[in-house]
Image (cartoon, rainbow, N blue to C red):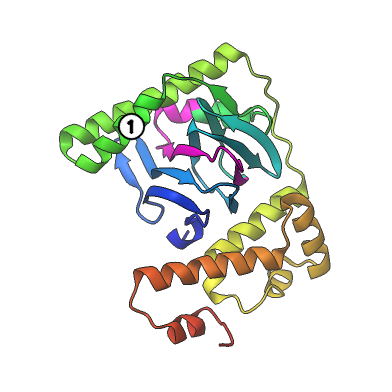
Amino acid sequence: PSIESYRMDIKTKYHFRNNFFENPKYYNDLILFQIGEALCEISTELSNHVHLDWYEFSYIVSGKGEIFTNNIGTPVKKGDLYFSFPKEIHHISSDNIEPLRYFFVAFNFLENSPLKSLLENYKNLAFSEKKRVYHSNSILGHFQHLLFDLEKDTLLHNLIFEYELKTVILKVFAIIESNDSAAYPPQRNKQQLLCFNIMNYIDNNIANMDNAMCLSEFFGYNYTYLSRFFKKVTGENISSYIINKKLTLAKDMLASSDISITEIANELHYSS
């Protein structure tokens, strides 16, 4: 997928983000897709986005808010860690008095890794969207060390980074097992799976989409039907999702390239 598909359009006072979606960083069997820290503005949201083949931890440093998975929200506060799985729809809402500050890391492991087997066990017994939060005050220091070692980028610090992140992952697994959280076999209906595929298609083809009607032809369903259940599953209209993704991509192109506004408008199929 294109890196532009996963840029965050949340309003922040401070945002330190390292994206490696196009070229993941490998630390032996560990695969890193993204890591960073964000301090939100008061009463703001990160709009709907999808995760592909990675897991993600979001650790709340301060403030409070709500993290949504498949349109089901769970309150989070200082010291909470939220565990996200692949192929899920997410968005984050920050409190209007105590804005969220949080660390985040997206990762996976190679197929032959023993930690991959642990992750797969948890994925196959997916936790309820309302039971993804695990409280721990001991993890904060690990995230601070991870960002420091990532920036150093030497052989020594790369090894420290690898074992530091693996330590965090194992600690989270230990917390989950000690809480004896109720798990259940994943039950994703056809509409939820189709909705995820629609979002994935939009994310990866946004620059080439003239309008939303092409989704009907690609997926073989009436557009009214697609639009109705997309709104039901995500809480957002297909057209709004496309507009937000296209505007985010346009802003990124303006900020990170020398392409003119006219060229960007032509490339993204704006009429002007």
Q: Quadrant of residue 213?
A: bottom right
Could you tell me residue 270's position as x and y percent?
A: 57, 82
Position in image of residue 202 (x %, y %): 60, 64
* Picture quadrant where residue 113 is located: top left
Which segment did they paint magenta?
89-118
Above/below status of 35 relative to 3: above
Residue 226 visible to an observer of this rendering: yes
Quadrant in which the C terminus appears? bottom right
Residue occupying the point 16% across, 36% down: 155
The magenta stretch spans residue 102: yes
**Residue that extends furthest to the front in the rendered view of this protein:** 97
Position of 116 with respect to 155 (left or right) is right
Amino acid carrying label 1: it is Gln
Work out which residue is located at the far top of the displayed protein and give it: 178
Tell me where residue 243 appears, x and y as whole percent.
Answer: 62, 69
Element assignment for label 1:
helix
In front: 126, or 261? 261
Q: Residue at image x 56%, y 42%? A: 86
Q: Is residue 254 above or below residue 157?
A: below
Q: In the image, is residue 95 part of the stretch drawn in magenta? A: yes
Nearest the camera: 89 or 52?
Answer: 89
Number of callouts? 1
Q: Is residue 59 above or below residue 217?
A: above
Residue 253 in the image, given as x and y percentages of width and height: 42, 71
Residue at image mark 1: 144
Left or right of residue 24, residue 245 in this image: right
Q: Residue at x 52, y 17 (%)?
A: 175
13 or 198: nearer the viewer: 13
Q: Is residue 222 visible?
A: no
How many C-alpha atoms fall within 10 Å of the one at disc 1: few (<14), some, or many (≥20)? Answer: few
